Amino acid sequence: MKYSGGPRPGYKTPGSSGADLCARIDHDITIPPGGWALIPTGIRVQIPPGYEGQV
């Protein structure tokens, strides 16, 4: 994983199964039901063939 500033991903509660990500934005974003948005997090990952990543 490569990281480019802002709050780092991390496990915020004991027993968490996944890391919490923070948005790197300077304004509020409202996503309507059924909508989508591209939200920058400041991380980049390279996933090898045969593996998957989930957000």
Image: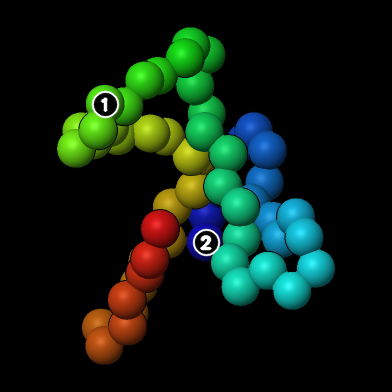
On screen, residue 47 above or below 20: below
Q: Which quadrant, please, contains the C terminus?
A: bottom left
Q: From where the camera sits, is residue 3 visible? A: yes
Q: What element carries label 1?
A: loop
User: Percent x, y for residue 23?
Assistant: 52, 33
Q: How would you rate the neighbour count of disc 1 (Cα within 10 Å): few for under 14, some for 14-19, many for 20 or more?
A: few
Q: Position of residue 30 (x, y in %)?
A: 36, 20
Q: Position of residue 24 (x, y in %)?
A: 52, 29
Q: In this view, does 4 lie to the left or right of 46?
A: right
Apparent side of residue 10 relative to residue 27 in the rendered image (left or right): right
Dot 2 amino acid type:
Met
Give the SS element for disc 2. Answer: loop
Q: Is residue 4 visible?
A: no
Say which mark, if any, is on residue 1: 2
Residue drawn at (52%, 61%) of the image:
1
**Colour scheme shown:** rainbow
User: Residue 38's x, y, as percent?
Assistant: 29, 34
Residue placed farthest to the bottom in the image? 50
Which of the 4 quarters of the picture holds residue 18? bottom right
Q: What residue is disc 1 on? A: 32
Which residue sits at x=25%, y=33%? 33
In this rendering, position of residue 35 left or right of residue 30: left
**Relative vertical location of residue 11 with respect to residue 30 in this rendering, above or below:** below
Q: Quadrant of residue 11 in the image? A: bottom right
Question: Which comes sooner in the sequence, label 2 or label 1?
Answer: 2
